[in-house]
Amino acid sequence: MSRWAALLSLDPTLQIVCRFTWLHTRCLLDIQKQLQALEDQLTHLDREESRRRTPPEPTAGSPEPVTASSPPTPLPPRPAYPTSGVDVATRENSRETLMSLIQEKLRLYGELTEQQHNMIGYGRPSHLGLYNMRSFRKRLGTSLDEKDYEWLQHGMQRKDLATLSRTGFSALFDSTMKFIIETIPLRVSCKEKV
């Protein structure tokens, strides 16, 4: 494997990787499903807290409001919802735990979407790059285990390979811009001296 890596690192056009687009997509869909469930839990928790804070509406059978002239009435039964400090602390802990889990899942989701975005943005390897890679592998012969290049076969079958080297146009554009940036100031400074 080390000889294979050494050969591939010699030429930028051989920096070919498998995108694993299907796996990235499956992971994204799974985390979306988890996030949706967490969002539902948080919404439920918010509704429960809102219900606890809102006093119950008087109903047709509820006692009349107490006035100075009315006789004392017994206290209403204790509400069914918890109001003790322990219950409030438990609710707050569950909210904190839920929010921590949501934040962790969102962070992971963001990382995966960024990775997927980057991988999709990489160009496809050139035919020459793929040919050279296969040629290197053949030259190495038996020193390579089949599993060492299985990903290449997998990526070629699924058309899921990407090259980390820049395309010819990008390289040409960058070298042209570098030439312009480096030579224009020199020409301007030479004319100023004359």
Image: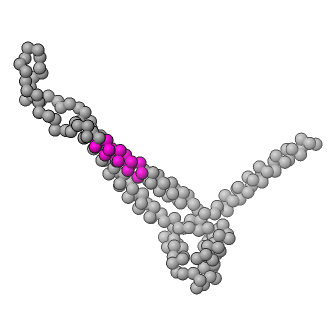
Residue 101 is a magenta residue: yes
User: Which residue does the image show at 89% across and 43% down from the upper left?
Assistant: 191
Q: Nearer the viewer, residue 156 or 44?
A: 44
User: Which residue does the image show at 11% across and 17% down from the upper left?
Assistant: 67
Q: Nearer the viewer, residue 182 or 146?
A: 146
Residue 8 to residue 85: above or below: below
Q: Residue furthest left?
A: 71
Q: Which residues are magenta?
A: 90-105
User: Which residue does the image show at 49% across and 73% down from the upper left?
Assistant: 154
Q: Is residue 113 visible?
A: no
Where does the image place residue 125, in percent across and percent down from the top left? 60, 67
User: Taking 8 as reference, is 146 left or right?
Assistant: left
The quadrant in which residue 34 appears is bottom left
Where does the image place residue 36, in percent across and percent down from the top left? 34, 50
Q: Residue furthest right?
A: 194
User: Taking 111 as reference, is 89 left or right?
Assistant: left
Q: Coloring scheme of the render?
A: one colour
Q: Residue furthest front?
A: 86
User: Which residue does the image show at 51% across and 54% down from the upper left?
Assistant: 114
Residue 65 to residue 129: above or below: above
Q: Nearer the viewer, residue 80 or 6?
A: 80
The quadrant in which residue 76 appears is top left
Q: Is residue 178 visible?
A: yes
User: Taking 3 as reference, is 87 left or right?
Assistant: left
Where does the image place residue 35, in percent across and percent down from the top left? 36, 51
Q: Nearer the viewer, residue 39 or 169?
A: 39
**Total residue callouts:** 0
Where does the image place residue 70, in percent across and percent down from the top left? 7, 17
Majority secondary structure of the magenta segment? helix
Quadrant assignment for the N terminus? bottom right
Q: Residue furthest top?
A: 69
Residue 194 is a magenta residue: no
